[in-house]
Amino acid sequence: MANATAFNFVIPQFRFTPISHNFSNEDNSKEISMEEVSWHDNANDCWVVIYDRVYDVTNFIDEHPGGDEVLMEHAGRDATMAFRGAEHGSKALQSLSKYMIGELPINERLFRKPGGIKLSDIPE
């Protein structure tokens, strides 16, 4: 009988980000699903959704006046209620514009869609 040698293999854990960017008919911005947003949930790759728009705030984490904890708490998720709860005004929303990378598909939106939640201060 031949000598059997045991091999121990270490298989690293990988998360593969699905590529599902599509162009919407509205304004040629990329459609990004909530599933895809959910893959970007750490300090090195942080996306959030605010008012149905997707923002890559990775480079803003250290600059956030409220600290990085609040962004990390909502990384990979919808942060609209936290954004509203902090009473951010239009100036804060304008400063986010440079981080916008897309928007949710119409079927995943809560606010910016026909019959969606209506709030008087939601930006168009």
Image (tube, rainbow, N blue to C red):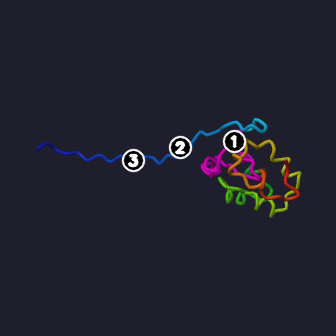
Q: Position of residue 26 (x, y in %)?
A: 78, 39
- Characterize the local packing of mark 3: few (<14), some (14-19) or many (20 or more) Cα atoms within 10 angstroms: few
Judging by the rendered image, the residue that carries numbered circle 1 is 31
Image coordinates for residue 119, horizontal then vertical, percent: 84, 59
- The outermost residue toward the front is 115
Please give left or right for residue 109 compared with residue 95 in the image: left
Specify whether 75 is left or right of 123: left
Magenta stretch bounds: 30-59
Does the magenta portion include 56? yes
Front label number (3 vs 2): 2
How many residues crowd around disc 1 within 10 Å: few (fewer than 14), some, or many (20 or more)? many
Mark sitting earlier along the chain (2/1): 2
Q: Amino acid at mark 2?
A: Phe
Q: Nearer the viewer, residue 14 or 80?
A: 80
Q: What whole-number distance in Å separates the C-alpha atoms at marks 3 and 2?
A: 18 Å
- Element assignment for label 3: loop
Quarter of the image with the N terminus is top left
Type of amino acid under label 3: Val
**Label 3 vs 2, first from the N-terminus:** 3
* Residue 104 lies in the magenta stretch: no
- The numbered mark, 3 or 1, whose residue comes first in the sequence reads 3
Farthest bottom residue in view: 85
Residue at mark 3 = 10
- Residue at image position (77%, 50%) is 113
Label drawn at residue 16: 2
CA gap, disc 3 to disc 1?
37 Å
Q: In x, y percent, where is residue 16?
A: 53, 43
